[in-house]
Image (cartoon, rainbow, N blue to C red):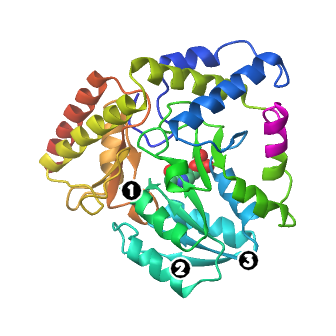
Amino acid sequence: MKLFTVGPVACYPVVLKAMGEQMYSHRSAEYKKLHYDTVGRLQAYIETQNPIYLFSATGTGFMEAAVRNCVKDSLIVCVNGDFGKRFADVAKLNGRKVEIVEPAMGEPVTPAMLDDALRSHPEVEAVAITHNETSAGLINPLKELCAVVKKHGKLIFVDAVSSMGGTEIKVDDWGIDICFSSSQKCFGVPPGLGIGSVSKKCLEVAEKIPNRGYYFDLLLWQKDHEKGQGTPVTSVIPQIAGLNAALRMVEEKGGKQWYFNLYKKRNTRIRRAVKKLGTPVYPRRGSESPTVNCVKAPKGVPGPKVYEAMRAKGFELAQGYGALKDTTYRIGNMGYIPNLSLTQMLDALKEVYEEIAR
Ligand SMILES: Cc1ncc(COP(=O)(O)O)c(C=O)c1O
């Protein structure tokens, strides 16, 4: 099966090779070298001096960590789809008050919208933003939104699960306090590793917040980060070795700009092809995600039917998600996708549309 999924995605051969190595202790010198080398490469990639923690958990762990460590009472959560909703649920289930900023479906959060919400709720401590809403194939104007939040002096949490690695993020320049992702997306590594940068300000706030829990206590993670130990729990060594190999591969091939361009090329090719078939993508023009196209299913055809027909031809796309399950299907362009597979997938999609129309 050729994967055009939205995570887990197909992994690069160099990643799988690195992950196949024999294990060693997460307290060994070998591990420490791997850990800090990976952290350093990630810091350069997302342009930050902040520490980066490597959670033995997926990205959602950082939603819980952000809320438990850095919010005492309330925050604003921007919602463009199901993962924004998840962030809001995590906050509510941890007893925090949530103010939602939710544009119409398929529309981005605008700086004006966020500014209004912050004026109406000056009491909030933080704002959570989903950079790239995977369920709707939509990207928000993160840099501009961060500028608004900074103007109001609040903390910024960014869910970059399906954007980190595949498109530009400048953590320090944009003033992001927590920026997190998961291994199984743009870096083309299997699931199980959460990656997140945490600002000094967050750590200062955390010191005054009781009941931070244990597993995601940022002060515990910072202590071990500073100590040169890496992680307070057993590290997911294979995933970290895989991520290290992926970051080296990108560097060897031309650096992150090369990788961003590769994603853009694949993504635009898919978007143009589906549009030519008469089915445009779901979000507003200019807000299309660079890592996943959320495609409107042909008229009268349920999205899952396209997904199943493609599976029968050997291509695993992704079904629509949440409220868009029946009316859309998704084509991811993250991870290991040889050019030939992309051509074959688009040819198969054309055949599927012809078969459906008969
Ligand atoms: C934007 C976004 N946020 C959060 C998540 C949840 O990530 P994880 O399952 O790695 O915790 C996903 C997963 O697809 C996602 O796409």
Please state which of residues 149 and 292 is positioned toward the viewer in this rendering. 149
* Residue 229 on the magenta span: yes
Q: Is residue 105 found left or right of 65 in the rendered image?
A: left
Q: Position of residue 225 (x, y in %)?
A: 78, 38
- The residue that mark 3 highlights is 73
Mark closest to the chain's N terminus, 3 or 1: 3
* Disc sitting over residue 118 in the figure: 2
Residue at 54% across / 67% down in the picture? 150
Residue at 76% across / 73% down in the picture? 72
Query: What is the span of residues highlighted in magenta in the rendered image?
Result: 222-234
Residue at 32% across / 50% down in the picture? 305
Looking at the rendering, which quadrant does residue 87 occupy?
A: bottom right
Q: Amino acid at mark 1?
A: Ile
Mark closest to the chain's N terminus, 2 or 1: 2
* Residue 55 on the magenta span: no
Q: Residues within 10 Å of mark 1 (few under 14, many from 20)?
A: many
- The residue that mark 1 highlights is 139
Q: Amino acid at mark 3?
A: Asp
Q: Position of residue 300 (x, y in %)?
A: 22, 62
Residue at 70% across / 22% down in the picture? 34
Q: Are marks 3 and 1 in contact (CB under 8 Å)?
A: no
Q: Quadrant of the N terminus?
A: top left
Secondary structure of residue under mark 3 = loop
Please state which of residues 282 and 237 is positioned toward the viewer in this rendering. 237
